Amino acid sequence: MGIGYVAGVAHELRRDYERGVFDRQMLAIIGGSSTVAVAAIAKGAYSFGVIGLLTAALFIYQPAQADRRWRDERRVDP
């Protein structure tokens, strides 16, 4: 997982924010969980780091999945 991957995730989160999938509070939770996870892993507390990453991933996945499902239902294919 490199800088390119992190930048890609940040870009996707920004696009989802602009579409209204996430609000500012949700992005704050995601950013806070990610920051705590990185700091914990850097200090050697791997269990806290993994829990932080899983929390951030859960908060990203659920609303994004619901948004994709909603867009698929509204799609009109010729």
Image: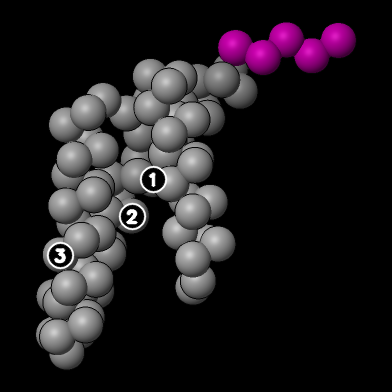
Residue at 17 percent across and 89 percent down: it is 44
The C terminus - image quarter: top right
Residue at 23 percent across and 49 percent down: it is 31
Relative image position of residue 72 (x, y in whole percent)? 61, 23
Question: Marks 3 and 2, how far apart in space?
Answer: 13 Å
Residue at 49 percent across and 73 percent down: it is 1
The residue wearing badge 3 is 36
The residue wearing badge 2 is 57
- Magenta stretch contains residue 76: yes
| Disc 3 crowd, CA 10 A, few/some/many (<14, 14-19, 20+) | some
First in residue order: circle 3 vs circle 1 = 3
Dominant SS of magenta comes to loop
Depth check: give the residue in front, 74 or 55: 55
- Against 46, residue 7 (above or below) is above
Amino acid type of the residue that numbered disc 3 sits on in the rendered structure: Val
SS of the residue at dot 3?
A: helix
Question: Marks 3 and 1, how far apart in space?
Answer: 19 Å
Question: Marks 2 and 1, how far apart in space?
Answer: 6 Å
| Disc 1 crowd, CA 10 A, few/some/many (<14, 14-19, 20+) | few
Residue at 49 percent across and 66 percent down: it is 3
- Against 42, residue 64 (above or below) is above
Depth check: give the residue in front, 67 or 27: 27
Q: In the picture, residue 73 is in which quadrant?
A: top right
Relative image position of residue 15 (x, y in whole percent)? 49, 30
SS of the residue at dot 2?
A: helix
> Mark 2 near mark 1, Cβ–Cβ under 8 Å?
yes
First in residue order: circle 3 vs circle 2 = 3
- Specify the farthest residue to the right: 78
The residue wearing badge 1 is 61
- Magenta region: 74-78
- Against 76, residue 32 (above or below) is below
